Structure formats: C-alpha cells, structure tokens
Amino acid sequence: MTDINAIAKQFTDFYYTTFDSNRAGLNSLYRPESMLSWEGSPIVGVNAIVEKITSLPFSKVQHRVTTLDAQPSSPSVASLLVSVTGLLVIDDSENPLQFSQIFQLIPDGGSYYVYNDIFRLNYG
C-alpha cells in the first residue's frame, strides 16, 4: 500500500517551494477541470488559477507548514485529501498570517494533479 503521508509531504514540499519561488510553475499541477476556492471565490481551470496566483499583490512569500494531514478521498480511486495549516510570511513581514489549505489530489499517470484546492487566510 502506498504511504499517503509520504505522498502528501512530497506534494506539499513541491507545491510550496514552487509557489514561493515561481508561482507560474504550478501550472503542471492543475487541469482544465481543476477548481481553486481562494478566500471563498471559485476559480476554474488551469489558466485562470495560474493567473490568480501569479497576480497576487506581493513580491516575496514564504509558506511555513505547521500541520499536514492526509486521507484517502475515494474507495475506488487512489485520490487523496491533504489538509495543511501554517504561517504565510509576505514581503518579509514580521507578522505572518495563518493560513489553511485543502487539496484533493487525483492520480494522473505516475503523479497527482490538484482537482480541488481551497485556500483560506486567518486574519484574526
């Protein structure tokens, strides 16, 4: 049996390293049917998702993951739900924001793509 925690860790390491250094490089993780819910606003399709994340109004960002949980999301397909919480440091701010993100990963060949992605900041 595949170690879903190892897959989740590998995926999130790649996702956040790429997001922090080259947001446009995330395009390979999304498909035309993928959906991102960014702070409650739905965005559908790889091009619209990449446009959203590359147009965010900051020049430097660093994700610091504090929790990572993974679960199978289907009894018939080797898909995963990955829940992440952490801190988001924007433009070297001394006051990081708390964030949470949930990914639904679907197998595609020998890797996974993001079918659903829910991102939320905690301003509180």
Image (spheres, grey):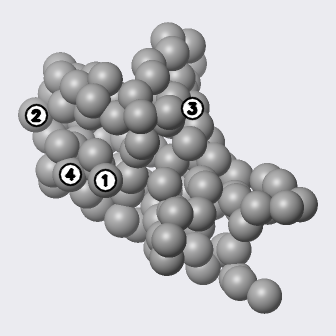
Mark 3–mark 4 Cα distance, whole angstroms, equals 19 Å
* Amino acid on which the number 1 mark rests in the picture: Ser
Looking at the rendered structure, the secondary structure element under dot 2 is: loop
Secondary structure beneath label 4: helix
Q: Mark 3 points at which residue?
A: 118
Judge the density around disc 2: few (<14), some (14-19), many (≥20) Cα neighbours within 10 Å: few
Give the spatial CA distance, label 4 vs label 1.
7 Å
Any part of residue 96 in sight: no
CB under 8 Å between discs 4 and 1:
yes
Q: How far apart are marks 2 and 4 (CA)?
A: 15 Å
Residue mark closest to the camera, 4 vs 1 = 1
Of all residues, the one furthest to the right in this rendering is 75
State the mark number for residue 59.
Answer: 2
Instruction: Return the x and y of residue 4 as percentages of the image width and height.
Output: 69, 74
Q: Mark 3 and mark 1: span between their CA atoms? A: 18 Å
Between 52 and 57, the one lying in front of the other is 52
Q: What residue type is labelled 3?
A: Ile
Q: Are the residues flagged by discs 2 and 1 in contact, CB closer than 8 Å? A: no
What is the x, y in percent for residue 93? 23, 35
Vertical placement of residue 80 versus 110, above or below: above
- Nearer to us of marks 2 and 3 is 3
Q: Amino acid under label 4? A: Gly
> In this figure, which residue is indicated by the disc labeled 4?
25
* Residue occupying the point 76% across, 61% down: 77
Crowding at dot 4, Cα within 10 Å, few <14 / some 14-19 / many 20+, comes out as few
Asked if residue 83 is positioned above or below residue 94 in the image, the reply reads: below
Q: Nearer the viewer, mark 3 or mark 4?
A: 4
Image disc number at residue 28: 1
The Cα atoms of the two marked residues, 2 and 3, are separated by 22 Å
